[in-house]
Image: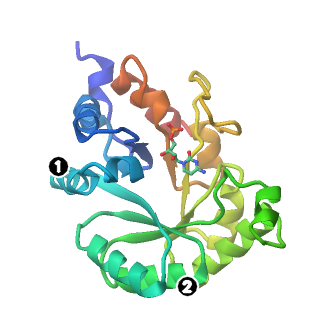
Amino acid sequence: MADAATAVKADSRLIIPLDLPTVAEARAIVATLGDAVSFYKVGLELFATGGMDFARELKGQGKQVFLDWKLHDIGTTVERSAAVLAGSGCDFLTVHGEPQVMTSAVKGRGASNLKVLAVTVLTSLSDADLVEMGYAESAKSLVERRIRQALEAGCDGVIASPHEAALAREIGGKDFLVVTPGVRPDWSAKNDQARAATPADALRAGASHIVCGRPITAAEDPKAAAGRVIAEMAGL
Ligand code: C5P
């Protein structure tokens, strides 16, 4: 009889972050997950050590790739960087949610398939942090302002905590991408995700995609853990 874990069919709404210090470790987890996972996020840690070449390698394997670069620079630099990254054939790119940055990234990716996603306000920032940085607005209000600005700039979506997903969906409409980290199944450790939501709750709130890492990558059997998350997503 086929092992249930080997029969898992990937759900492209599930994105696995490859938050690992070496390409060798990232390659190993991708091999372990096999056909159970089709979408990976490559972030700054891995970019610093060959991650961009690895992103191209993943594309070569037919995977979808989310480049979590969080671009934030002068317009010309963002535009030119987005144009180069669009040439990689990757699927998602993050930029900080400031109007000039977002508009430049959208211009740079041009007619390519690269979707530009705005990071509204980093969830590590409190209202007090924003005051210290010179903002006269609460995090909640700034998140809402930036979702609207992302839409106006032509971004394809935003990164949103599960608690912001409903607002992003309401403002952005049905085709807006709402990509939600901070996702923890009931059965897994919360790690440092203080206000986590389950995969099903995140999707119900309006997420188009969920980012779920350590519950799967640090599990004893990552493929089986991915299967449990995918089953929960399918059961909605
Ligand atoms: O392992 P875990 O599921 O916590 O990974 C979550 C991923 O989402 C990490 O790559 C983390 O950097 C990213 N992220 C997050 N919270 C945010 C924005 C991004 O956890 N607000």
Q: Quadrant of residue 166?
A: bottom right
**Image location of residue 137, percent across then percent down:** 82, 70
CA separation in Å, label 2 and label 1: 34 Å
The amino acid sitting under disc 2 is Gln
Q: How many marks?
A: 2
Characterize the local packing of mark 1: few (<14), some (14-19) or many (20 or more) Cα atoms within 10 angstroms: few
The residue tagged 1 is: 61
Badge nearest the viewer, 2 or 1: 2
Q: Residue furthest front?
A: 132
Q: Is residue 46 left or right of residue 229?
A: left
Q: Residue drawn at (32%, 31%), measured in percent from left and top?
A: 8
- Whether tag 2 and tag 1 are in contact, CB under 8 A, the answer is no
Mark 1 C-beta to ligand 1 under 8 Å: no
- Name the secondary structure under disc 1: loop
Is residue 185 or residue 6 the one in the foreground? 185
Q: Quadrant of residue 135?
A: bottom right
**Image location of residue 52, percent across then percent down:** 26, 57
Is residue 19 or residue 175 the one in the foreground? 19
> Where 8 sits versus 133, above or below?
above
Q: Is residue 114 left or right of residue 125?
A: left
The residue tagged 2 is: 100
Q: Is residue 47 left or right of residue 213?
A: left
Q: Quadrant of residue 168?
A: bottom right
Q: Residue drawn at (63%, 37%), measured in percent from left and top?
A: 193
Q: Is residue 97 left or right of residue 54?
A: right
> Where 49 sits versus 77, above or below?
above
The amino acid sitting under disc 1 is Gln
